[in-house]
Amino acid sequence: MAAKSKNTKKKASSNVLYIGMDLGTSRSAVVASSGKRDWVHSYVGWPRDFVARKHLGKDVLFGEEALANRLSVHLSRPLEQGVIRDGTVRDEDAVRELVHYLIEAAAPGDSTEVYAAVGVPAEALRVNKMAIRDAVKEYADRLMVVSEPFAIAYGIGVLNNALVIDIGAGTMDFCIMHGTMPTEDDQRTLTVAGDYIDRHLLDVLSEKYPNARFSEPLIRQAKEQGAFVGSGKNRVKVKVPVDGVTTELDIAPEMQRVCASIVPVMTEAMMDLISEYEPDFQDEVKQNIYLAGGGSQIHGLDKALVDALKDYGTLNVNVIDDPLYAGAEGALALAQDMPDEYWEDM
Ligand SMILES: Nc1ncnc2c1ncn2[C@@H]1O[C@H](COP(=O)(O)OP(=O)(O)OP(=O)(O)O)[C@@H](O)[C@H]1O
Ligand SMILES: [Mg+2]
């Protein structure tokens, strides 16, 4: 581990700012030991030319503002499936800009040092630590990269005989907790999550209404307002142009069907992980299942999982509070508790 001499094995001084960060495909969040918190849609945009630069008045735009000006900027959503996308320099720059934005939002002010714990999807740990390290090193003195579902579990205090499922945009991450640091074997990542639902819903609706023009942002918005499985809602309305005329459609049946399509994928992974667990404690794990991430907000999902797995025993599935900040809160808790040897000096 190459350490900067100024940090070598130094105990944290009182002027250290601890930061917990959740780098997500669709949303990234930060929580700091100072109490500051913020989040942003994971978009970065650079003005396309000098006209755009003059019109926008900025060198770089973030989140909704970048998306709203997508005709005047080169737009990047760099964390596809939770990893920094391969290849393009622009995506790596975008991650660096996002990290910078979030650290600025945490207002390091006159802190002498910044210690950042960054949560990424479990699978990304295998391939992407270097890229994240590169993005963070300019702005932080110490770094710890942790798996997102583990950060969430730690933050909500679920440490033993439990299963945490983080349903994000790019990935769905599973993590079994057994009273120690989870290893790779305790975790699974599937690429069936929010973006998958959006794409699938767009396909199904475009097929059913060939003359209607659906956009991805509209579909996502409709999902965030009306996602459900089971018999929760009977109407989910969207307004779309049909042959050029704005028309209201009820997409409840398609919404329910597409959202329900993730249930078998989830139950299979859940059973897999639980059946590999120490037999004497499997029943306890079944009582401690937690849904996190934006996808945990799909109405009726907890009940649908309980129903689908009723032959395997009675399950207790909880939806966590505050899914937007749970990852960053957990990363901050880890940052504040982790012993020295887990930190990497930058
Ligand atoms: N109320 C809701 N109902 C259903 N889905 C929702 C709701 N609110 C947000 N989502 C979806 O949750 C996803 C975003 O969740 P989250 O912020 O946890 O993901 P992320 O951390 O950016 O992604 P990842 O963890 O895959 O990198 C998006 O697909 C979003 O559309
Ligand atoms: Mg996430």
Image (spheres, rainbow, N blue to C red):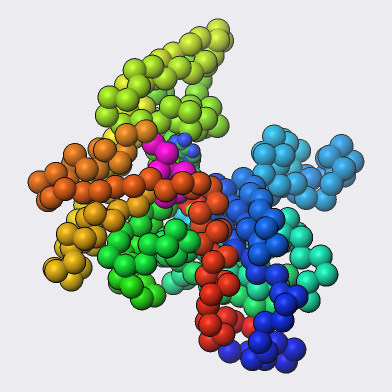
**297 drawn magenta:** yes
Q: In this view, does 318 lie to the left or right of 108?
A: left
Percent of width and height locating residue 190 = 35, 54
Above or below 2: residue 182? above
**Vertical position of residue 20 compared to residue 67: above or below:** below
What residue sits 31% from the left and 59% below the top?
163
Q: Where is residue 271 in the image (x, y as percent from the top left)?
A: 19, 56
Residue at x-position 34% and y-position 17%: 234
Give the quadrant of residue 195.
top left
* Residue closest to the far right: 54
**Number of on-image labels:** 0
**Residue drawn at (78%, 76%), measured in percent from left and top?**
112
Q: Nearer the viewer, residue 169 or 290?
A: 290
- For the residue pair 325 and 186, the one nearer the viewer reads as 325
Using the image as rendered, state which of residue 102 and residue 250 is in the foreground.
102
Q: Can residue 261 be seen in this view?
A: no
Magenta-highlighted residues: 292-298
Residue at image point 87% right, 43% down: 57
Q: In this view, does 255 lie to the left or right of 277?
A: right
Examine the structure image and report whether residue 288 is included in the region drawn in magenta. no
Q: In this view, does 64 lie to the left or right of 152?
A: right
Q: Is residue 156 visible?
A: yes
Could you say where residue 160 lies in the image, as x and y percent from the top left?
Answer: 32, 67
Q: Which of 229 and 127 is in front in this view?
A: 229
Quadrant, the C terminus = bottom right
| Image quadrant assignment for residue 279 | bottom left
Point out residue 38 in the picture as x, y percentages from the top left corner. Answer: 66, 50
Task: Point out the image quarter for the N terminus.
Answer: bottom right
* Horizontal side of residue 200 vs 3, given as left or right: left
